[in-house]
Image (spheres, rainbow, N blue to C red):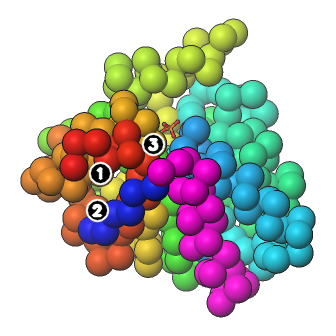
Amino acid sequence: MEYRIFESTDELALACADIFTALLKEKPNAVLGLATGASPVKTYKELIRRYKAGEISFAGVTTFNLDEYCDLPKDDKNSYYTFMHENLFDHVDIKEENTHLMDGNAADPEAEAAAFDAMIEQAGGVDIQLLGVGRNGHIGFNEPADHFTEGSFKVKLNDSTIEANSIYFDENPMPRYALTMGIGTIMKAGKIVLIATGKKKAEAIRNAVKGEVTPRCPVSVLQNHPDALLLLDREAASLL
Ligand code: F6R
């Protein structure tokens, strides 16, 4: 597992956008695995800027998102569907039918998750998967557990995640469940790029890089991926 440390989150976002730009130029019909949350926002802004400047196009791109909350209307302001539209999809030339998020309100969540994994396979697999990391080491919503998960599934969010993400929920209570790509799904991506910034991520990053590979710290599994890159600011890298 490789890591790079940046002096600012702006520089980090430019480097991350460069990785996606290179892929889109080489493979206009690339399959992207995308994340929500604070970590990728600046990267998405830079990709939108490059699209508007005529440097890149998403016209042939297919996307699959890591996760989606359960029991939240699709168009709720806090759904990941809304997040992706506001932060990327509505501002570039991607085709709506080529963007995929799991339906957190599906009547049969396990069937929904299995169908999602099948769609990824059908699309030829994810070329680059973008990740953030939770303070507790989660990737997607794979929380610390006794074993690594395989395919996508419905998960009960743990207290640390609920506390971290509650800040976004001022009206409705934060959902307690989500659908997430499994660790096995994430690990199938050709390349993985993870963004971590700020002191609150330092411990997870230390465990990811220097700790043993353990499902108690899910991000540590990236040590087993042949092409995983961590993009860090000084604070997130402060315990390395
Ligand atoms: C988001 C996701 C989560 C976040 C993580 C970090 O789709 O799967 O694993 O990446 O919780 O969140 P931020 O970036 O808000 O610190």
Q: How many marks?
A: 3
The residue under label 3 is 197
Whether pointer 2 and pointer 1 mark residues with C-beta atoms closer than 8 Å, the reply is yes
CA gap between label 3 and label 1 equals 15 Å
Rendering coords of residue 236 (x, y %): 36, 42
Residue range of the region highlighted in magenta in the rendering:
7-30
The residue under label 1 is 219
The amino acid on which the numbered mark 3 sits, given as a three-letter code, is Thr
Mark closer to the chain start, 3 or 1: 3
Is 92 situated above or below 81? below
Rendering coords of residue 22 (x, y %): 63, 81
Q: Is residue 195 left or right of residue 36?
A: left
Q: Note whether residue 75 is visible.
A: yes
Q: Is mark 3 within 8 Å of ligand 1?
A: yes
Is 121 situated above or below 100? below
The amino acid on which the numbered mark 2 sits, given as a three-letter code, is Leu
| Mark 3 neighbour class, 10 Å CA radius: few under 14, some 14 to 19, many 20 or more | many
The amino acid on which the numbered mark 1 sits, given as a three-letter code, is Val
Snapshot quadrant of residue 231: bottom left
Of 181 and 140, which appears nearest the observer? 140
Label 1, secondary structure: give it: helix
CA gap between label 3 and label 2 equals 17 Å
Could you tell me which residue is drawn at 29 percent across and 77 percent down? 226
Q: Is residue 140 left or right of residue 32?
A: left
Mark closer to the chain start, 3 or 2: 3
Mark identifier at residue 181: none
